[in-house]
Image (spheres, grey):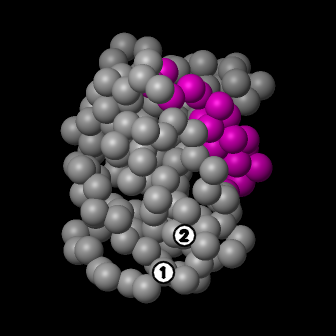
């Protein structure tokens, strides 16, 4: 497994992966310079740079998504939520075919190991924003939602 680091507007991101795909993006304190030899990790770094500039709406980085069958189903459906859009936990559960599993969908969402690319920040509570476990918590979620809203209709 190789690691790459990206200094983003929401903090330093540590990207973990190999030829089978990116398996984690972690919010960390320190940027570490690494010589990234894996082509997929280089693509991920390039796509993150474009995303944060408002120029990328759909990632092509290969992913290696873990989790239970239900969690993987949730993560696949998260990737179907359009850039700049939001769905509720209940809507996410319905997308998985399990209408009443909104708490389970929320739990899977909270365990997402590949934030931003698997856009868990696009899921909100029916009565507000809900939570966010990455970076600075809710402030990070708000930043991501506002960032996407700003660039949503731009080419």
Q: Position of residue 63 (x, y in %)?
A: 65, 59
Q: Is residue 73 magenta?
A: yes
Tell me if mark 2 has few (under 14), some (14-19) or many (20+) residues whose alpha carbon lies within 10 angstroms of its own: many
Q: Residue at x 43, y 53 (%)?
A: 48
Q: Position of residue 123 (x, y in %)?
A: 48, 29
| Residue that numbered label 2 is attached to | 41
| Residue that numbered label 1 is attached to | 36
Which one is earlier in the sequence, the residue at label 2 or at label 1?
1
Q: Residue at x 31, y 32 (%)?
A: 147
**Distance of label 2 from label 1 (alpha carbons):** 7 Å
Q: Position of residue 62 (x, y in %)?
A: 67, 59
Q: Is residue 88 magenta?
A: no
- Viewer-side residue, 92 vs 76: 76
Q: Disc 2, disc 1: CB below 8 Å?
A: yes
- Viewer-side residue, 108 vs 134: 134
The part of the chain drawn in magenta is: 67-85
Q: Residue at x 44, y 18 (%)?
A: 153
State the image quarter where residue 27 is shown. Answer: bottom left
Q: Residue at x 55, y 83 (%)?
A: 37
């Amino acid at each position: 497994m190789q690691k790459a680091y990206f200094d983003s507007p929401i903090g330093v991101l540590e990207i973990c992966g190999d030829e089978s795909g990116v398996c984690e993006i972690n919010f960390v304190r320190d940027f570490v310079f690494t010589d990234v030899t894996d082509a997929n990790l280089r693509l991920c770094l390039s796509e993150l740079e474009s995303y944060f500039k408002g120029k990328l709406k759909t990632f092509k980085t290969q992913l290696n998504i873990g989790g239970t069958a239900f969690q993987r189903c949730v993560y696949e459906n998260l990737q179907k939520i359009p850039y700049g859009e939001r769905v509720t936990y209940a809507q996410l559960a319905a997308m998985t075919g399990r209408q009443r599993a909104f708490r389970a969908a929320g739990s899977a969402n909270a365990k997402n190991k590949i934030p931003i690319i698997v856009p868990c920040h696009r899921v909100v509570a029916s009565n507000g924003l809900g939570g966010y476990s990455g970076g600075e918590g809710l402030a990070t979620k708000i930043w991501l939602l506002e960032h996407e809203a700003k660039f949503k209709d731009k080419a």
